[in-house]
């Protein structure tokens, strides 16, 4: 089991205050508005666009990957680049993942197997409709097989940012 979140590569490391408890390996985003605006939170919108930003472990001696950051604490995070390998989270009960599967946000800081969204098309031309298309929904690719479909807790998975 790896003991660090960044396994390969040279992502950009930064630090920011968190608005909720975050564990290293979570996919994170900035709170867009309200009293916690600008702080980090777990990526909350399953299947929607996400930047490859992940919480990492503290860099002092004894900082472990399972040591969560508490609300209002400053957390270390990385802005990962294509090819960087990280040790991320997948949720309990997640569909089985095979090496090479594309991954997207599952919400709550986890990743899940990517599922393309179906789009309705009216070919009759009489009705108008709006389609929201997420162009950055895929964040990473699985670098190992992992079946957590029967799991009762989130588990870690080695992923490559794409």
Image (spheres, helix red, strand yellow):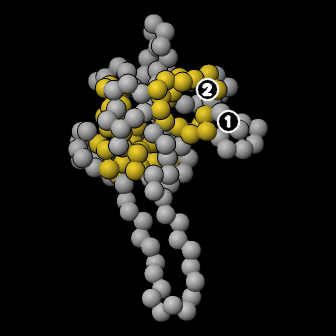
Query: Mark number for residue 16?
Result: 2
Give 6 or 57, whichever is nearer the viewer: 6
Indicate the quadrant containing the C terminus: top left, top right, bottom left or bottom right: top left
In-image side of 116 versus 28 (left or right): left
Return the x and y of residue 39 as percentages of the image width and height: 65, 33
Mark 2 touching mark 1, by CB under 8 A?
Answer: yes
Secondary structure under tag 2 reads strand
| Residue at image mark 1 | 38
* Residue 58 visible in the picture: yes
Q: Nearer the viewer, residue 77 or 23?
A: 77
Distance CA(mark 2)–CA(mark 1): 8 Å
Vertical side of 136 occupied by 126: above or below: below
Q: Quadrant of residue 80?
A: top left
Q: Any mark on residue 127, and which?
A: none
Q: Position of residue 134 (x, y in %)?
A: 48, 58
x then y, percent, for residue 161: 36, 39
């Amino acid at each position: 089991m790896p003991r660090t979140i960044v396994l390969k590569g040279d992502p950009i490391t930064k630090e920011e205050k968190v608005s909720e408890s975050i564990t290293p390996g979570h996919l994170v985003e900035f709170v867009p508005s309200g009293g916690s605006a600008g702080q980090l939170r777990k990526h909350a919108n399953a299947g929607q666009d996400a930047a490859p930003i992940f919480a990492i472990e503290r860099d002092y001696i004894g900082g472990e990957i399972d040591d969560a950051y508490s609300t209002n604490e400053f957390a270390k995070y990385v802005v990962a680049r294509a090819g960087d390998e990280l040790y991320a989270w997948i949720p309990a009960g997640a569909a089985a993942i095979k090496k090479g599967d594309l991954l997207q946000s599952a919400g709550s800081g986890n990743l899940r197997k990517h599922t393309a969204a179906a789009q309705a098309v009216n070919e009759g031309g009489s009705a108008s409709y709006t389609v929201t298309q997420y162009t950055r929904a895929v964040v990473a690719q699985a670098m190992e097989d992992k079946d957590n479909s029967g799991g009762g807790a989130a588990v870690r998975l080695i992923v490559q940012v794409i």
